[in-house]
Image (cartoon, grey):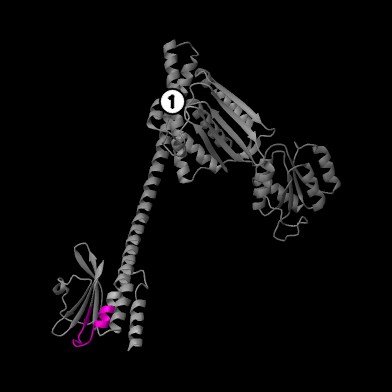
Amino acid sequence: MLVEQLSTAYKCHSSIGNSINLKEMITEVIKTFISESYAIYGEFYQKEEESLKKIVSFGKLSNFDIKNYDSYTKPMSLITEEKINIIKMNLDQGIIFLVSKNKNADCSFFYSMFESLIPRLNLSISSCINYEKLLVSYDLVKKQKIELQKANKTKDEFLANMSHELKTPLNSILLLSTLMSKNKDDKYDEKTLKNMDIIKKCSLELMDLINDILDISQLEAGKVSIHNESIDLKVIIEDIYASMKEMTLNKNIDLIMDFKGNHFTMISDKRRIRQIIKNLVSNAIKFTSEGYVKITLTELFDRYQIDIEDTGIGLDNDKLEQIFDRFKQADGSTTRKYGGTGLGLSISKELAILLNGDILVKSQKNKGSIFTFEITKQKEDNVIKSFIKNDDKLNGENNNIKTNIIVYLKDTIEQFKLTIKLKKCDYHTFAALNEESFITYLEKLKDEKAVILIDERVKDFENIIKLINDLNYKKIITVTNNIELDESLLNKIEKLIKG
């Protein structure tokens, strides 16, 4: 008898909590409770605010009305009627009814067993209900996210279209105000010319704002394209210095440049690099009323570091995190006093990350700030090597390749572009980064069928041509300017290959 009771208790206990789905879980519970007891019918109702919702029933029983048992409010009740026994289990979030027709059966064991299972039932039912609520919330959040993405896309499209529409008349205003300011025929008096300068200045400020809005829209849409080229960071900083020197003179503050290193050339997007540095310098000048703004360019082992230091108003440490948020400044009074939208730093930060860099900031209230723009070095050789894979053997024994082409141009960026295009046309292409590597390719290939594409402007051109002839290379194309891989060049290459 004891073994049977232990087995029954184990089965009933084990039936609870086997599914996170409420209906599945409670169906297994009711079925097990009925099969292991005298019950012929069972059902479960979930509590919903002021009502009960029937979730599952198992077995057959006619004319069973749960309202007749509303007065039984204890956690466990054994109700004996003329033809049936009823066990009612009042749970935290539902009610279980188990009905037996064996009126004379001893239900004491089942009563105590079911009573001991109430805490586990409450926990399992609560978990299922919370999971269902979580699913509903997740679906709702998912739908809201889709709606927000659509709304955001609509907003970006509107901002982009509006910005383009605004730029057209604004460009006309700028052009006219610039022409009138020149006053070639001495038509305008001093007051008119002063007004023209004000119009021009305001138009330029508005143009900057429109460009910022366009940048924000493109960044959010992931449509900002990077145009890599060979740039000189020192030259860019010197240009920015020259364009902003007058601004600092008007404010009676010093603008200082400092260069630490010897080589400042790299591969990156010139326009975006200039935009970032100019934003940071402009920001420093705006918030500095006395002292200086200093631009320091430092060459490090693997990166360049550009520090923009000022003796301006500075920031509290708790405000530093939000300065890169869009449309935010340190506080409202800053915006009112110094102007601006708070877009510049946000755009600069996102562009810096896009260029494989970052912007960091240190600041002290009423003492000044240092904004540090770090960007990883991208040398011409590294960029070309990362894209051009010379994994095939230098003898060119690859049946899928049309022929070998050795490219040696003065402009490494143009060479890189041309090499990629030739590879896409299935030519086995070798890009010589310098005279030494070009000669190495010539000597290792020793392929008289190979095409040599060489720039007449490269160093020691005449001696190189002599070496090419000595090595019995016959198919040579010389260029004098930057070239594109167009149909005429392809035809020329094919013609040389065919002999």
Is residue 296 a member of the stretch shown in magenta?
no
82 vs 18, left or right, is left
Q: What stretch of residues is rendered in magenta?
A: 98-112
Image quadrant where residue 341 sits: top left
Image quadrant where residue 54 sits: bottom left
Compared to residue 237, the image places residue 217 above or below, namely: below
The residue drawn where x is 53% and y is 29% is 281
The location of residue 389, given as percent across then percent down, is 69, 52
392 vs 202, left or right, is right
Asked whether 422 or 228 is in front, the reply is 228
Farthest front residue in view: 2
The residue drawn where x is 84% and y is 49% is 472
Would residue 236 be visible to someone looking at this image? no
Asked whether 381 or 344 is in front, the reply is 344
Compared to residue 4, the image places residue 153 above or below, namely: above
Asked whether 27 or 15 is in front, the reply is 15
The location of residue 278, given as percent across then percent down, is 53, 30
Amino acid marked by disc 1 = Ser
Would residue 318 be visible to someone looking at this image? yes
Asked whether 63 or 413 is in front, the reply is 63
Q: What residue is disc 1 on?
A: 203
The residue drawn where x is 45% and y is 22% is 200
The local secondary structure at tag 1 comes to: helix
Is residue 99 a member of the stretch shown in magenta?
yes
The location of residue 215, given as percent across then percent down, is 47, 38
Quadrant housing the N terminus: bottom left
